[in-house]
Image: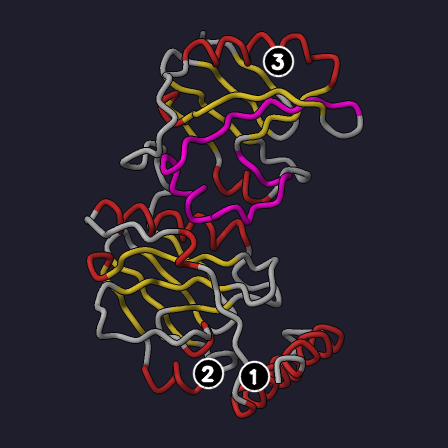
């Protein structure tokens, strides 16, 4: 088609075999979109196209990604808020007729195959990537993931294990739990069955913990997607989403006390406010 349809925060350029999504860098644009910059979505990676009424006089054109085609969607596992869905294009309601035209054009070009993709069809974010979690710094160079622990946040179990480096060949996948949800974290799933991984992410040397402004979606999710794509590319077996669910467990009182102590150190250093300290302390105490 070769045409461009511009909406709020993004513009879609329709090409013969793909849709090129270019995200704006405006102050109101979600930070995840700004971090992604642009994404080329092959038509083979799209299962369907919808056009629905939006909020406050808008319409929403959405490409429904084919299961297994996009590492970002796979890593997110349904946790992204609607406003941060990179497959949604929000337009003024007066452009509904034009949006409907492009929706029909896209539908005509889609294949009938809606089965899960055998490999990723959408390119992952490019390495190197890094971000700061609550208890350490995570880095990915395209070949291995490294965790470097912070003395102000890391548990004693992580300090005892030391800084960690995990080649992607030793992993089977990743578990990303949004920082906007309680117990947010990024966990690397290890291939070696002899290595038991603690249920609690703050005790697992193969995981970093989010919270208090650390591990934001626009940094940690692209990181997780890039690692997941590298793992699949190295032959790592996919892990079912159901197997990635975090299990609620009661914490050891000693671990709770240690986390509260770390929070106090962060507060004393001016890194968190009294209100943030009180809120998180109450959450931790509620787990006892």
Labels 1 and 2 touching (C-beta < 8 A): yes
Q: Residue at x 41, y 16 (%)?
A: 110
- Which element carries disc 3, helix, strand or loop? helix
Q: Is residue 78 magenta?
A: yes
Where are the magenta residues, as a range? 57-86
Q: How dense is the environment of label 1, judged by Cα within 10 Å: few (below 14), some, or many (20 and up)?
A: many
Q: Residue at x 48, y 13 (%)?
A: 106
Q: Find the residue positioned furthest to the bottom.
A: 254
Labels 2 and 3 touching (C-beta < 8 A): no
Per the model, the C-alpha gap separating discs 1 and 2 is 7 Å
Say left or right for 255 vs 197.
right
| Residue identified by numbered label 1 | 259
| Residue identified by numbered label 2 | 155
The image position of residue 87, as x and y in percent, is 53, 31
Q: Is residue 127 magenta?
A: no
Per the model, the C-alpha gap separating discs 1 and 3 is 51 Å
């Amino acid at each position: 088609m070769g045409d461009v349809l511009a909406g709020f925060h993004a513009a879609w350029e329709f090409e013969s075999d793909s849709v090129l999504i270019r995200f704006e860098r405006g102050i109101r644009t979600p930070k995840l979109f700004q971090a992604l910059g642009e994404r080329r979505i092959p038509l083979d990676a799209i299962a369907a196209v919808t056009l629905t009424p939006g909020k406050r006089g808008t319409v929403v054109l959405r490409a429904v990604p084919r299961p297994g085609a996009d590492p970002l969607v796979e890593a997110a596992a349904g946790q992204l808020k609607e406003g941060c869905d990179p497959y949604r294009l929000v337009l003024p309601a007066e452009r509904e007729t034009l949006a409907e035209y492009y929706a029909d054009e896209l539908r005509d070009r889609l294949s009938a195959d809606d089965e899960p993709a055998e490999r990723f069809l959408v390119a992952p974010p490019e390495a190197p990537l890094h971000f700061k979690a609550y208890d350490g710094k995570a880095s990915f160079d395209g070949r291995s993931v490294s965790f470097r622990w912070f003395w102000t946040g890391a548990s004693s179990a992580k300090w005892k294990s030391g800084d960690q480096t995990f080649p992607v060949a030793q992993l089977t996948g990743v578990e990303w739990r949004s920082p906007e949800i309680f117990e947010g974290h990024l966990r690397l799933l290890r291939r070696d069955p002899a290595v038991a991984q603690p249920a609690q992410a703050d005790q697992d040397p193969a995981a970093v913990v989010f919270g208090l402004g650390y591990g934001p979606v626009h940094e940690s999710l692209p990181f997780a997607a890039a690692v997941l794509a590298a793992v699949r590319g190295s032959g790592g077996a996919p892990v079912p989403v159901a197997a990635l669910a975090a299990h609620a467990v009661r914490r050891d009182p000693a671990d709770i006390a240690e986390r509260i102590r770390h929070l106090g150190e962060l507060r004393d250093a001016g890194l968190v406010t009294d209100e943030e300290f009180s809120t998180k302390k109450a959450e931790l105490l509620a787990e006892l």
